[in-house]
Amino acid sequence: MTKPARPEPPFLALTGGIGAGKSTALAALERLGAAVLSTDRVVHELYESDEVRDEVVNRWGKEVAPAGRVDRHAVAAHAFADPEERAWLEGLLWPRVGARVFEWRAEQGRRDPAPPALVVETPLLFEAGMAGMYDATIAVVAPEELRAERASARGHTAVDERTARQLSQGEKAARATYAVTNDGTEEDLERRLAEVLAEVRK
């Protein structure tokens, strides 16, 4: 008698603006048992690769990779200053990020027991047209004053330029399957995310 096929865990995307609390939410989802992946971390890994380093050096010169390692701030200075340069960088990185997410999903799908969900943190989820890859999407939102405080405390640079290329919080929330407000404690956020996980698993 053949074993019945095991249902795949829900494949979810997590997004939100700068300072909304995406990383905090991702950590909470991991505590709740979900398998998690940060595309920012994937990008960090890509910048460590010889292939991507050589591409950005060929494009912008050796000053973007002093001592042979990519300086993300130097890359950002070029990319955020010109829409064409940003489009070039996104064309370099996004297909590679997508391939890594695909590999990760396959790896996690083989786990036994399966995690309750697979969650990928993707800051530019809707802007990159990637929402259709997922079973559901979660947007983390927070009051603007709180976002500004968090971004400043973490030393984010070029916040205005970065925010300008993103959809507003309201637009992200409207497009997402679930919008979760992060305006309290980490425990509050974790409780709200636990409710989302319970909902997607119904």
Image (cartoon, helix red, strand yellow):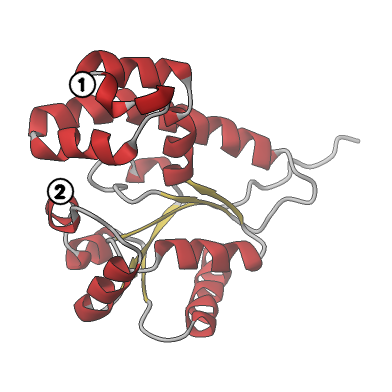
Residue 113 sits above or below residue 68 on the image: below
Kindly identify which numbered label has been placed on residue 70.
Answer: none
**Total of numbered circles in the picture?**
2
Type of residue at label 1?
Trp
Residue at x 26% of width, y 48% of height: 126
Question: Which mark is nearer the camera, 2 or 1?
Answer: 1
Q: Residues within 10 Å of mark 2 (few under 14, many from 20)?
A: few
Residue 44 sits above or below residue 161 on the image: above
Image position, residue 64 (x, y; %): 28, 28
| Mark 2 → mark 1, Cα distance in angstroms | 21 Å
**Disc 2 and disc 1 in contact, CB within 8 angstroms:** no
Residue at x 13% of width, y 57% of height: 160
Which is nearer the eye, 196 or 54? 54
Image position, residue 49 (x, y; %): 48, 23
Left or right: residue 53 compared with residue 78: right
**In which quadrant is the C terminus drawn?**
bottom right
Residue at the spot of label 1: 60
Which is nearer the eye, 17 or 134? 17
Residue at the spot of label 2: 165
